[in-house]
Image: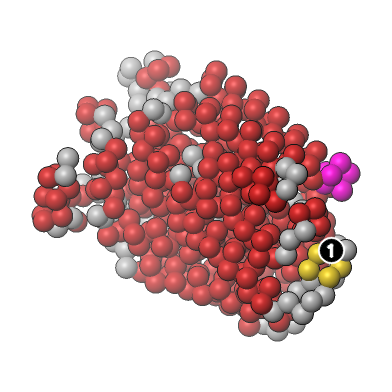
Amino acid sequence: MTRNAPVWLSWVMWGLVASLYLIGFFQRVAPAVMVDNLMRDFEIGGALLGNLSAAYFYAYAAVQIPSGLLADGIGPRRLSTIAALLAAIGTLVFGLAGNFWLAYLGRGLVGASVGVAFVTCMKLAGHWFPTNRFATVTGVALLLGNLGGVIAGVPLSAAVSAFGWRASMVASALVTLAMAGIIWLLVRDDPHERGYRSYAHASVLESGALRPLRALRLVLVQRDTWLLFMAGGLSAAPVLVFAGLWGVPYLVQVYGVDRSYAATLTSTMLVAWAVGGPTLGAVSDRLGRRKGPYLLANALTAALWGVFMFWQDLPSLLLFPLFAAIGFTSGGLIIGFAFSREANHPGASGAVGGVVNMSVLGFAAVLQQCLGRILDSHWDGLLVAGARIYSHDAYLSAFWWLFICTCLSVIAVFFTRETHCRIREGWEKSVTPQVLQQVNASE
């Protein structure tokens, strides 16, 4: 096994697993174009709708650490296949639900199953691609994921209008089921299974991944793990919450545009996020730096959310470029995944991916629900066709938290330590001897 796998084969192996991330992102933001339908069918307000949408986020966040450990243990192929099967079932339950709680269960099952997708993408990338391309490849995952978000915008809005939201969800379940079969038949966890040389770290090739509990303990005692956990969640949550749920009703109710046009505007943010991920990841790879590019990207994101908040009566013509700029700079999130992987033990890549990715959806779940509660607390009682209508001031009161979160993400990145795009040699030196002794004693 002296030859590297052909580039096209590496992309195919990785891309098939990444397709599950695309489906997961589609399901993540799909409720944004079904707000009126869901409120009407289940007779709920903003807080309960936020809960329904957040069920995906809570379940997704909850499985991140287990999925990281499973990715290290049973491998991306098996884990992704099982996840795709469960996602198809969850989507069917949601689409056919006759009451709110059954819909809630379906959303939760979808979130829990597709929650493995991004972690398995990162795990697979570490075997099929060299380390100095990791941020670029992970950025492409964000690109594919956001393509799913775009499909959940105007195309899904048109499908909902033509066929109804339930039929649209059933169709997406069938697509997910087909992907489960394709992943099982074609994907392989490591190039050596195809007769090629692996890109996995030498210590992993010699000794294998760390035992799950040891890997998790070593990841959790790393200071940079927690800083990057905070930075990733606080920078991504505003985009996910705005584009994934509250952006469309805000634009419809405040700017008076139709739902398809509003979905186009929020999709602009997701498209730009998709482009920003691989672009900023590639810049970081090329510069051989993680901290500087990540810090600059998050600072610009915070400044742009500040423009959105403080520019009263923002002209509608400026919404497209502003949302595009916010989405693009938010793509710096991808640098954080490569950053956290390099700051930890090479045998714990699945565990660190799960821990850091947990924050992205975890923060979004909490923020999404909080915004729903704030909107309901400012609701003046206006209903149109069974759906609550919120005022401009109500939305601004809620959207303050988008700006605050991104400011906090800048602070978190500021206190990280540079890895220079390499697995940090002597990583154990960044852990105090007392803590390392406790970890070893706990084995």
Magenta range is 159-164
Task: Kindly identify the residue that appears in the image at 52 percent across and 48 percent down.
Answer: 59
Task: Kindly identify the residue that appears in the image at 72 percent across and 65 percent down.
Answer: 45
Q: Is residue 10 visible?
A: no
Q: Main secondary structure of the magenta part?
A: helix
**Whole-percent x and y of residue 250?**
74, 69
- What is the quadrant of the N terminus in the image? top left
- What is the quadrant of the C terminus in the image? top left
**Whole-percent x and y of residue 60?**
52, 47
Between 42 and 69, the residue placed more toward the observer is 42
Between 42 and 273, the residue placed more toward the observer is 42
Residue 253 colored in magenta in the image: no
Question: What kind of element bears circle 1?
Answer: loop
**Whole-percent x and y of residue 391?**
76, 78
Q: Is residue 201 visible?
A: yes
Between 261 and 329, the residue placed more toward the observer is 261
Residue 162 colored in magenta in the image: yes
Between 27 and 124, the residue placed more toward the observer is 27
The colour style of the image is secondary structure
Q: Which residue is mark 1?
A: 386
**Please, is residue 242 above or below residue 390 in the view?**
above
